[in-house]
């Protein structure tokens, strides 16, 4: 096990959190509460230590990296310097190799390397944030709520995260309120409500948990509402899916 939380309590915000994160998987932690997501992410990454309970980790703190959702907290004049900052104690040759590797892994265009971070696009800023978190070569990457993305950039990130896990053997823990994003990217999910863990399972079970999701003040996608309504009111047995094309095929099979 890469990381295990046992009975973790933090003030009145988190209550008896028990969960395990296996190596080489993508986890999403679903919650509508920004505060509990922020504190849990910081506890997992060692930024907060005055919690109760126990965290058992296979890794030292420098092997667990944290990516915040703030796109405006860059402190350097260039993208290159932002990536250099976490590894500035290395020799220049090693720094350049690490930065070049991050650019290659994230498929970031070299032309932005010496631009001011505030001059690059929103999508490039998110990739830069991922790069800053990865440049130290952590084994675990904790991401606290990605900014709102259009479908195009969301698909790019989902593909990227899966590649990071598969090819570079990382563990990703993503704290989010986006149910469909969670379903598309995760191997396993954890659902929080009022600071308590109320459900956890494999990805295939997520879209079956509509009552718990709604009870946790999370917005259930309209496509899932439609499927549930068809099941309850029309007695049409549709498969749970987030893909509109698959839904249309299923409707055709059931009502023709």
Image (cartoon, rainbow, N blue to C red):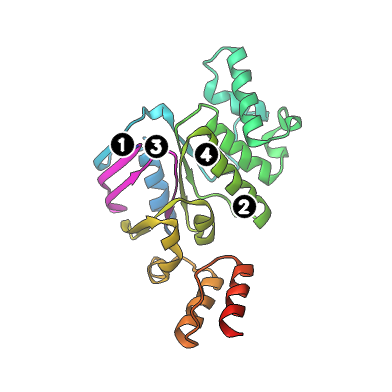
Percent of width and height locating residue 92: 61, 13
Task: Establish if 76 lies above or below 210.
Answer: above
Where disc 3 sits, the SS reads: loop
Front residue of this view, candidates 126 and 188: 188
Q: Which residue is mark 4?
A: 166
How far is mark 4 from mark 1, CA to CA?
Answer: 31 Å
Q: How many marks?
A: 4
Tell me the quarter of the picture where residue 242 sits: bottom right
Percent of width and height locating residue 22: 37, 41
**Mark toward the viewer: 4 or 2:** 4
Mark carried by residue 154: 2
**Mark toward the viewer: 3 or 2:** 2
Judge the density around disc 1: few (<14), some (14-19), many (≥20) Cα neighbours within 10 Å: few
How far is mark 3 from mark 2, CA to CA?
Answer: 24 Å
Q: Which residue is mark 3?
A: 45
Tell me the quarter of the picture where residue 209 sits: bottom left
Sequence order check, earlier mark of 3 and 4: 3
Q: Is residue 124 left or right of residue 41?
A: right
Sequence order check, earlier mark of 4 and 2: 2
Judge the density around disc 2: few (<14), some (14-19), many (≥20) Cα neighbours within 10 Å: some
Percent of width and height locating residue 3: 34, 38
Start and end of the magenta stretch? 2-30
Q: Which residue is mark 1?
A: 49
Where disc 1 sits, the SS reads: loop
Asked if one can make out residue 24 in the rendered structure from this viewpoint, the answer is yes
How far is mark 4 from mark 2, CA to CA?
Answer: 18 Å
């Amino acid at each position: 096990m890469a990381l295990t939380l046992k009975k973790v309590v933090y003030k009145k915000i988190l209550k008896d959190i028990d969960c395990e994160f296996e190596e080489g998987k993508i986890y999403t932690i679903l919650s509508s509460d920004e505060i509990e997501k922020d504190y849990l992410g910081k506890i997992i990454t060692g930024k907060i230590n005055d919690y109760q309970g126990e965290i058992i980790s296979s890794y030292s703190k420098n092997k667990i990296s944290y990516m915040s959702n703030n796109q405006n907290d860059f402190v350097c004049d260039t993208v290159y310097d932002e990536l250099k900052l976490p590894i500035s104690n290395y020799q220049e040759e090693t720094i350049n190799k690490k930065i070049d590797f991050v650019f290659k892994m994230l498929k970031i265009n070299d032309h932005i390397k010496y631009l001011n971070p505030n001059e690059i696009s929103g999508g490039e800023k998110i990739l830069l944030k991922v790069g800053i978190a990865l440049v130290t070569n952590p084994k675990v990457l904790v991401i606290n709520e990605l900014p709102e993305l259009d479908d195009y950039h969301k698909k790019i990130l989902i593909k990227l995260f899966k590649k990071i896990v598969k090819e570079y053997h990382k563990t990703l823990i993503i704290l989010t309120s986006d149910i469909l994003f969670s379903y598309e990217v995760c191997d396993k999910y954890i659902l929080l409500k009022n600071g308590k863990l109320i459900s956890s399972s494999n990805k295939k079970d997520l879209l079956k948990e509509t009552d718990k999701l709604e009870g946790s003040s999370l917005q259930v996608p309209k496509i899932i509402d439609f499927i549930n309504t068809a099941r309850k009111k029309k007695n049409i047995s549709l498969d749970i899916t987030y893909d509109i094309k698959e839904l249309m095929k299923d409707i055709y099979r059931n009502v023709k």
